[in-house]
Image: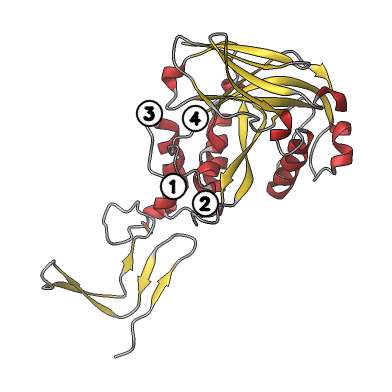
Amino acid sequence: MDKPTIFVNPKSGSIKISGEVDVVDIDGKVIETVTNPKLCGCGLSKDKPWCDSSHGEYVKIVAQQLRNARELVKPSHLYGAKPVRAREIRENELKYRLEHEEVLVGVKLGGALNSRKKDDPTYINIFGYLTDAMQCVDSLLVASLIYPRAEAEVVFKVGKEISTEIHPSEVLDYISHVAAGMEILDYRFGQVEAYAEDCIADNAGAAAFAYGAWVAAHQENLDALTAEVFVNGILTESAPLTAIQGNPWMAVVEVSKLLAATGVKLVAGSIIFSGSATIGVQMVAGNNYRVEIKGLGSVDIKAS
Ligand code: FES
């Protein structure tokens, strides 16, 4: 008899075993004998351990799970998500939002762990889409979120369409205005293992955002400024803007790289959230949150 082989389909996750295989119970007693079985590796089969082709619905099912989640959900990598799958899930969610009359207004930059080796953590930049429905003015209903955190960021207004990678020396050609921004992050995969696949699939945790008055973009707007987060008037987090990519303008460069690789264009008038300067501050109903970047502006949100 030929040696059995195992083929793991890299796209679907299914596991095909060639040859005759005995299925045994806990005592080793043969229950049935199957030929060339296909096992589920994606975790979605309703007929485990066999693959029932539910993997074809993987992207839609995970996107739905994330959208409807009201508590932390299982990391997608436990379902065998690969980066390409994670990106498909993010795109599926955007498609759903656009079909429900939301308008794409920009993107946010974020970071995620790219390695599961505890002694060798490496981080990569990722992005998430921002739609008009995520914008909040004055208040935010935190009960609609799972673990919302407020982060202090710089917001850029795109003055000229971004469709290719931008060189750092060209950034001011593409950005017309800047503002102080508050991003409200709400990852549905918990706090401990923020791996890239999970974060990308979860649209980089983008849940809500707010920003203050626009200021004309000049290099000096951002040099040597500090971002502060206040809770009920008390300074809670503070960090120099150089905490953003070493120089906040580089956030625009990094976003342009990610978008060029994805084939996404940012039209004039779109916004870019830079990624956080500060640690995220957990939001609790009843509290007032303020992001202030002296020399740039501020934005206030009441959590209800
Ligand atoms: S791999 Fe086919 S249903 Fe899971």
Q: Residue type at mark 4?
A: Asp
Q: CA distance from mark 4 to mark 1?
A: 16 Å
Classify 79 as above or below 69.
below
Mark 1 or mark 4, which is nearer the start of the sequence?
1
Residues at discs 4 and 1 in contact (Cβ within 8 Å):
no
Q: Residue at x 27, y 61 (%)?
A: 49
Q: Earlier in the sequence, mark 1 or mark 2?
A: 1
Query: As drawn, is 38 to the left or to the right of 272?
Result: left
Query: In the image, what residue occupies the spot 73% across and 33% down?
Result: 242
Q: Residue 56 location in percent, x, y?
A: 43, 53
Mark carried by residue 143: none
Q: Which residue is mark 4?
A: 186
Mark seen at residue 76: 1
Q: Percent position (x, y) of residue 271? A: 72, 27
Q: CA distance from mark 2 to mark 3?
A: 23 Å
Verify CB contact (< 8 Å) between mark 1 and mark 3.
Answer: no
Which amino acid type is shown beneath numbered disc 1?
Answer: Ser
Nearest-to-viewer mark from 4 and 1: 4
Residue type (three-letter) at the residue carrying disc 2: Arg
Label 4 packing within 10 angstroms: few (<14), some (14-19), many (20+): many
